[in-house]
Amino acid sequence: QAHFVESGGGSVQQGGSLRLSCAARGFTLDNRRIAWFRQAPGKEREGVSCISISGQSTYHADSVKGRFTISRDNAEDTLYLQMNSLSPEDTAVYYCAAAKYRAALPGATCLIPSNYYIWGQGTQVTVSS
């Protein structure tokens, strides 16, 4: 069964950094758009960052631009999210997700949750002030 195994969440002080990893199991990330989402308590799930099939193009939500970096290793079927300059507003459960095979998802459409159908179990990120 296709799924992800997430790791790397935790607690950090404001201004700190964390790196999230997401390994695909039961399927390959080749030819799939992949992305990170997050959901804070009482809020809807929101797109954070996404990366193209080739890995050459990325798109970030305005709230994380310049602080978060998404990357992929297709050989290892793994997705990463490097998070720097973290603030309490970044506190949330973070999820990785994969879109359907060869789905283009240009621009901001790559941050819409309904465009993804394989999801990680989520990892908690807590940033204290």
Image (cartoon, rainbow, N blue to C red):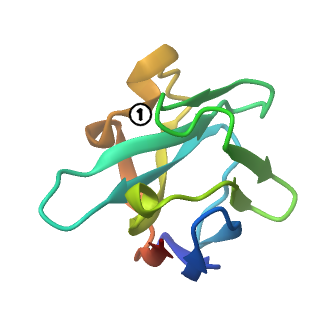
The image quadrant where one finds the N terminus is bottom left
Furthest residue to the left? 42
Where residue 7 appears, as percent x and y from the top left, is: 61, 80
Q: Could you say whether the residue bearing mark 1 is in a helix, strand or loop?
A: helix
Residue plotted at (78% across, 30% down) = 54
Residue plotted at (40% across, 41% down) = 47
Q: Quadrant of residue 30?
A: top right
In this rendering, the answer to whether 12 lies above or below 17 is: below
Residue in front for this viewpoint, 67 or 73: 67
Residue 103 in the figure: left or right of residue 24: left
Residue in front for this viewpoint, 37 or 106: 37
Where residue 17 appears, as percent x and y from the top left, is: 71, 66
Residue in front for this viewpoint, 83 or 34: 83
Residue in front for this viewpoint, 113 or 8: 8
The residue under label 1 is 111
Residue plotted at (33% across, 34% down) = 112
Residue 69 in the figure: left or right of residue 45: right
Furthest residue to the top? 107
The amino acid pointed to by label 1 is: Leu
In this rendering, the answer to whether 27 lies above or below 112 is: below
Where residue 4 appears, as percent x and y from the top left, is: 53, 72
Where residue 35 appears, as percent x and y from the top left, is: 53, 46
